Image (tube, rainbow, N blue to C red):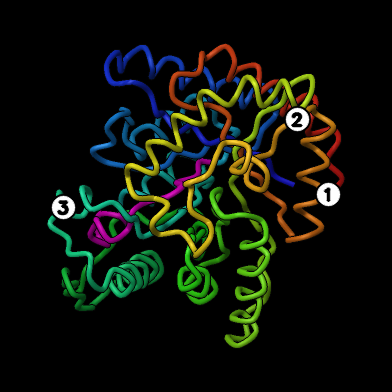
Amino acid sequence: MQLSVIIRGQHPLGDTAGHMRDDLELVRTAEKVGLDGVVKGSHYSSEPFESVQQIPFLAYCAAMAPRLRIICGLVLVPLHKPIDLAEQLATLDVLSGGKLVFGAGIGYRDVEFKAFGIPRGKMGARFEECMTAVRRLWTEDRVTMKGSNFELDGAVCSVKPLQKPTPPIWIGGNADIAVQRAARIGDCWYINPHNTLETIERQMNLYKRELDVLGRPFPTEVPMRREVFVASSRAEAIRLAQPYLEEKYKAYRAWGQDKVMPEGDDFNHEFSELLEDRFLMGSAAEVADQINRLNKRLGVNHIVASIHWPGMPNSLAIEQLHRLGEDVRPLLTF
């Protein structure tokens, strides 16, 4: 079983240095309480929040918390060229002593695609050709390949990752087609935090069928991200978390995140409906039981916990890390 924490880094605009100190304190605490990894996502033009960039942040984490796995969750692959991704991520794998996880996704926000000059059309094809190129750059001496927005002409990836043949590749996605893509080109499906468990169970069956068609085994690592909050009781957990989580999902609706969800899984619900089948909340025993049931129902054996949301005092997030590492983890049965 693996238990990691995602450092969203979503803070009100301004005082970036202060927010960075807070986020790095979370990383130090995650290592101290015995968690397994630190995860950082990637967004650009992230108003109404600021969000520091993924690769430099994780590089710093690798130096200050050398025991933790360093997990990109997720790189917005269509925005980037494969030679740049291959060398940047290989460098990160070397810096971390071979602890990198390459989490990859497509993205969904128009403001990001427009800023990079990337058309929304054929995103899936662009994603797949870039992922193919990165794998080849990591595993071959020279690569010749022409993509829709790049050309490799005997290109050499001058830095190779320590992990062979490649670092673990997690493919994230909400839609059915993304789940099928994960079976085809990833080492595992990185299960998203937004879909309901009913949808995820249906998609897990789809994922397994696709693996069977491809003749690929079910992965040994099955990661899933969830919003998590531990308190003395479920009622207290909901009371403390609700103001911050509501603000986060309000922004996600404004960004259009719910428009790319499977039918029936939008965010246009009251908080009580959102938390019922999406969030892990309650006492340590209740949260551990919810995680244990995810393992039995879906095979999940790596929880990426989101425990810090916009506006939340850092002291409360630090407390959550202690509760996860010291109170919840000993109760997990897998």
Range of residues picked out in magenta: 70-85
Q: Earlier in the sequence, mark 1 or mark 3?
A: 3
* Residue 312 visible (yes or no): yes
| Percent coordinates x, y for residue 91 in the rendering | 36, 46
Q: Is residue 72 magenta?
A: yes
Q: Nearer the viewer, mark 2 or mark 1?
A: 2
Specify the quadrant of the image occupied by residue 125: bottom left
Pointer 2 residue: 282
For disc 3, the neighbor class at 10 Å (few under 14, some 14 to 19, many from 20) is: few
Crowding at mark 2 (Cα within 10 Å: few <14, some 14-19, many 20+): many
Q: Which mark is residue 334?
A: 1
Look at 59% across and 15% down and name the residue there: 316
Residue behind mark 3: 116
- Residue 277 vs 182, above or below: the answer is above
Residue drawn at (87%, 45%) of the image: 333
Three-letter code for the amino acid on which mark 3 is drawn: Phe
Q: Secondary structure at mark 1?
A: loop
